[in-house]
Amino acid sequence: MRLSLRISALALLMLGLPGCDEAPRFEHAEPGEALSAGSATVMKFDQNAFSQPAANLSPLRRLDFSVGNSFFRNPWVIAPASTTARDGLGPLFNTNACQNCHIKDGRGHPPESDSDNAVSLLVRLSIPAGAEHAQALRERGIVPEPIYGGQLQDMAIPGVAPEGRVRLNYSTQFVRFADGEEVELRKPELHLSELGYGALHPQTQFSIRIAPPMIGLGLLEAIPQDALLANADPDDRDGDGISGRANRVFDQVSRQTVIGRFGWKAGQPNLNQQNADAFFNDMGLSSRLFSRSSCTERQHECLALPHGGEPEVSDPILAQVLFYTRNLGVPARRAVDDPEVLAGKTLFHRAGCQKCHTPQFTTGADAAEPELAKQLIRPYSDLLLHDMGDGLADNRPEFEASGREWRTPPLWGIGLTATVGGVTRLLHDGRARTLLEAVLWHGGEAEAARQTVLTFDSGERAALLRFLESL
């Protein structure tokens, strides 16, 4: 019975549906559509699919990739140590290696039980801004919590108290499709305990974040700024209900306000600063970009401990990690010519999902690495901020992003999430256990798309998911 419903839905799609004339119908794959990252696309689809060097790297450049991988994968240690190139961890931190959060270079996930470590989940902190916080807002985009800073660090070296213990509970709700099928959605409720340095500010704002996948980041960085801004419509002048806009953030090198691209709220301007910020906040490691200690002024025992040099992450190491993170390949799409996948692509466009999840860009000729230049890529993201409604709001601003806005996450590789990481946990806080749950959490500017999806019957839903799984 399920098979016949699916075939019936596909047949209707191919024949054309009433009221759908504005949306394109896809009967064949586009030329080169399987190559999500152009000539950098990799042909690997197992648990190591996200850990491959871009396919167009030369053998010599792959050696540089391997060196960067070693600093990304291997743990950092407490200072002082004989391993001077990799010491200085903490004293407060969330993890001792990048790949502990970005599991197999993929996305993290929230703790699944009370005994599970929250290592690939972070809690960002801030307080409401006042007139006296102008400099902090310009340079950090937030006002850090006075005692605990901008991120709760739930691990520490021996002799230092961790900042706290992170646990999640979930509330649930049900969403019903037009055909009567129901889907359970869950929303995380944050619980902090064992605070090591006293009570939090009474107006503390919290944001739960899981680590995003690492693939294709150098290609996203290489998209020309003008191409991104061409999709921005902050005043919704075309009246389609979509008003994406760029975040404006602080560049630590130029000391200027520029467009943000990286992070869940596009709070970082480039990949090097994103990496340095992760070293600093996630592992307590200084670099030329973030040279101060991650310990706050009220954490005296933390400030008094030895460090691993100034800076702990040297410029050469930061450059090697940058090369690695710029050149992680994107796996090719699968089954792009499958009729069900093509039907799902038609439904994706009928719902209007492509208005934020922009299918393709061409990277600039002036990309940071020659392998990244002039590539036709298909990330399915505009890298812009969109109001996603109350359901997904963290109510914590970051630079110009409001508490309801999020950067459109790229969808390339999303169908391999469970293959790489063992589980599927989607959205900024990992609440969604399936692709369908993630779709149904969309609100705000995406509410019309969500309502359209809720009219899909079981065969149409299956086709939409097959398309998403092919990405």
Image (tube, helix red, strand yellow):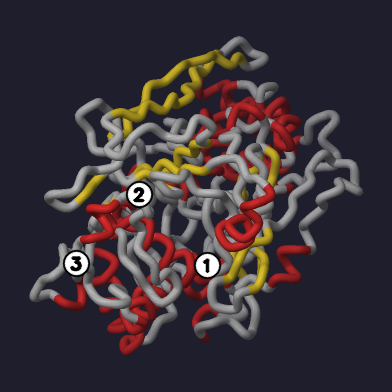
- Residue behind mark 2: 298
Residue type at mark 1?
Ala
Residue type at mark 3?
Pro
Observer-nearest residue: 250 or 175?
A: 250
Contact between labelled residues 3 and 2, with CB atoms less than 8 Å apart: no
- Residue behind mark 3: 306
Percent of width and height locating residue 196: 27, 38
Residue type at mark 2?
Arg
Q: Earlier in the sequence, mark 2 or mark 1?
A: 1
Observer-nearest residue: 165 or 453?
A: 165
Q: Secondary structure at mark 1?
A: loop
Q: Residue 380 occupies which quadrant of the picture? A: bottom right
Q: Residue 170 occupies which quadrant of the picture? A: top left
Percent of width and height locating residue 461: 58, 29
- Mark 2 to mark 3 CA distance (whole Å): 17 Å
Pointer 1 local density, CA inside 10 Å: few below 14, some 14–19, many at least 20: many
Task: Give the numbered dot on residue 37.
Answer: 1
Q: Residue at x 45, y 38 (%)?
A: 208
Of all residues shown, which one is farthest toward the left? 82
Q: Earlier in the sequence, mark 3 or mark 1?
A: 1
Q: Residue at x 28, y 53 (%)?
A: 300
Contact between labelled residues 1 and 2, with CB atoms less than 8 Å apart: no
Residue 465, relative to residue 169: is it above or below? below
Contact between labelled residues 1 and 3, with CB atoms less than 8 Å apart: no
Q: Residue at x 51, y 51 (%)?
A: 471
- Tag in front: 2 or 1: 2
Q: Is residue 298 visible?
A: yes
Residue 150, relative to residue 451: is it above or below? below
Residue 396, relative to residue 443: is it above or below? below
